[in-house]
Image: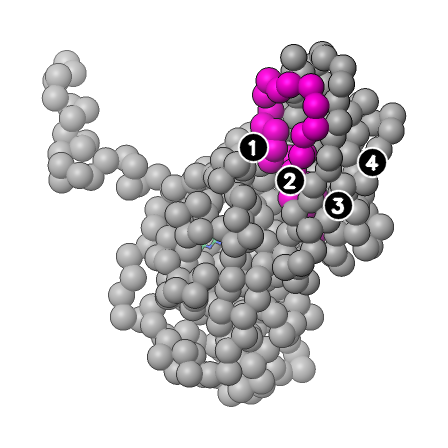
Amino acid sequence: MMKPDDRSNEFSISPHYTTRELIPENQETPIHFLRHWITPEDFLFLRNHFPYPSLKEEAFLLPIDGEVKQPKIFRYGDLLHMPSRTVTAVLECSGNKRAYFCPQVYGVQWEDGALCQAIWKGVSLSYLLSLTEIADTAVEVVFEGYDAGKRTDIDGVFHYARSLPISKAICPDTLIAYELNGKILPYKHGYPLRLIVPQWYGMAWVKWLKRITVINHHFTGPFQEIDYNYYPCKENDLGKRPVTTINVNSIIQYPLDLSEMNTGTHYIEGLAWTGEGIVSKVEISTDYGQTWHKASLNQDLSQPYSWVGWTYVWMVGQKGEYTIFSRATDTCGRTQPFEPEWNRKGYGYNGIASVRVKIE
Ligand SMILES: Nc1nc2c(c(=O)[nH]1)N[C@H]1C(S)=C(S)[C@@H](COP(=O)(O)O)O[C@H]1N2
Ligand SMILES: [Mo]
């Protein structure tokens, strides 16, 4: 017979020990909180596959070994004194906007707020690799995090781990970061050390770095080979390809969806970003895409990996219900499509953004 207190026992380990600490923390940022050029720490989204790791002293040692001529263990304190590099870069989860896929897909139902822009400071990974010297046999670099746990699909306990091809690993702006927005990297964002991979979706930006291993083959960990691949077919794995660079994308931040507004002049505002080249134009339509009008890009603060704010002055005299579309294009000629490619795990959504407004 079930005792009435059976369930409460689960939680009686400590009065503060609830399931909240056992499940990974995932939180998005309402897009009207993303109105700063640099997202303040308190407004950063959080994406975790496992509960937060507890860090011991080893977390301040970073080994680099494998296919290198001089394996080394770098101390956190030494990294702080090496030549530093700073990048302003967009961080977007590849599952951002997943909730908008039709038909719907399983996974964290992110709307548009798994996105931020921050200033990341650290040491170029290429600098560290120049000290360890990469062997000719090297193919990829694997980054393992301290967090670990079980998965729902395969047995075993896994650390969060991802790889980069050598070509991306040695980009000068691929960083081992120790600072975010001018302060010590916050614990929830990977303290003490985290990988920064500008232009790639967030899954590549491994937090709580435990070790870096150069390997002579393709890495096949589950966060590389199962997750973070586009599977365009529902029934099989045909067309499978890895998720890498960020798709060209935009959001409308003003007005918010389903706003009521007066006739007159309105400043439609939002953000646009891309992972290849830079954003070359943003266009707005208020007639379901029949006509498009260029928004002005506020490029004063622009940097190679940053988002760009845009504004479109809309003069509306006619009362009624409208849908406003925004569509960004980048210098590589990529444009947001009406229908992004559906894929089973719901990555890379970049369909034209829209909000509905009522003019009264
Ligand atoms: N160690 C570790 N690194 C990780 C993850 C993780 O679960 N564990 N999640 C990744 C994913 S999918 C994203 S989108 C970003 C989110 O970074 P944030 O939580 O700092 O916003 O971290 C990446 N790095
Ligand atoms: Mo992500």
Mark 3: secondary structure: strand
Residue drawn at (14%, 14%), measured in percent from left and top?
A: 1
- Label 1 crowd bin: few (<14), some (14–19), many (20+), radius 10 Å: some
For disc 1, the marked residue is: 111
Q: Mark 2 or mark 3, which is nearer the start of the sequence?
A: 2
Q: Residue 291 in the image: x percent, y percent?
A: 87, 29
Distance (Cα) linking label 4 and label 2: 15 Å
Which of discs 3 and 2 lies nearer the camera? The answer is: 3
Q: Residue 268 in the image: x percent, y percent?
A: 67, 34
For disc 4, the marked residue is: 293
- Label 4 crowd bin: few (<14), some (14–19), many (20+), radius 10 Å: some
- Label 3 crowd bin: few (<14), some (14–19), many (20+), radius 10 Å: some
Q: Residue 110 in the image: x percent, y percent?
A: 54, 34
Amino acid tagged 3: Ser
Disc 3 + disc 1, Cβ < 8 Å: no
Q: Which mark is residue 296?
A: 3
Distance (Cα) linking label 4 and label 1: 26 Å
Amino acid tagged 2: Gly
Q: Can residue 139 be seen in the rendering of this structure?
A: no
Q: Mark 1 or mark 3, which is nearer the start of the sequence?
A: 1
Which of 312 and 193 lies nearest the eye of the viewer? 312
Region of the chain picked out in magenta, as a range: 249-274
Q: Residue 186 in the image: x percent, y percent?
A: 37, 58
Q: How many labels were placed on the picture?
A: 4
Amino acid tagged 4: His
Q: Image quadrant of residue 197?
A: bottom right
